[in-house]
Image: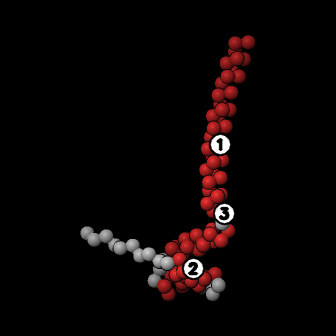
Amino acid sequence: MKKKKRRNYTKEFKEEAVKLITDQGYSYAEAGRNLGLNPNLLSKWKREIEGDESGSTVPMQAELKHLRKENKRLKLEREILKKAAAFFAKELG
């Protein structure tokens, strides 16, 4: 069975395709039909381009990862302190 060769698109092509939706008012389905693309792919490209323009996607993801890791550590510490407090309350009581 032959594998389908994955098509690669230039950044300029992706930008122009997204402009059909954003600037010219085409729906994703219309633009997809005209270009021979899946509308979901156009939606993905639009999100990527909007993310590039804001410049905040990658730093926000890194910060989110860091905060989740810190949150996990703090929850673990809290559980340890609860157990220690219960242990010492028993000892004193």
Q: Quadrant of residue 53?
A: bottom right
Residue 23, how many percent across, how many down? 65, 84
Report how far apart the C-alphas of labels 2 and 1 lie in the structure: 38 Å
Q: Mark 2 sits on what residue?
A: 15
- Which label was assigned to residue 55? none
Report how far apart the C-alphas of labels 1 and 3 lie in the structure: 21 Å
The residue carrying pointer 2 sits among few (fewer than 14), some (14 to 19) or many (20 or more) residues within 10 Å by Cα, namely some
Name the residue at 68% across, 27% down: 81
Q: Amino acid at mark 1?
A: Glu
- Kindly state the secondary structure of the residue where label 1 is placed: helix
Q: Mark 3 sits on what residue?
A: 56
Residue 84, how many percent across, how many down? 67, 22
Mark before the other along the chain sequence, 2 or 3: 2
- Kindly state the secondary structure of the residue where label 2 is placed: helix
Q: Quadrant of residue 19?
A: bottom right
Residue 19 visible in the displayed image: yes
Residue 42, how many percent across, how many down? 54, 76
Q: Is residue 5 above or below residue 77?
A: below
Mark before the other along the chain sequence, 1 or 3: 3
Q: Amino acid at mark 3?
A: Ser
The residue carrying pointer 3 sits among few (fewer than 14), some (14 to 19) or many (20 or more) residues within 10 Å by Cα, namely few
Residue 1, how many percent across, how many down? 25, 69
- Which label was assigned to residue 70? 1
Report how far apart the C-alphas of labels 2 and 3 lie in the structure: 19 Å
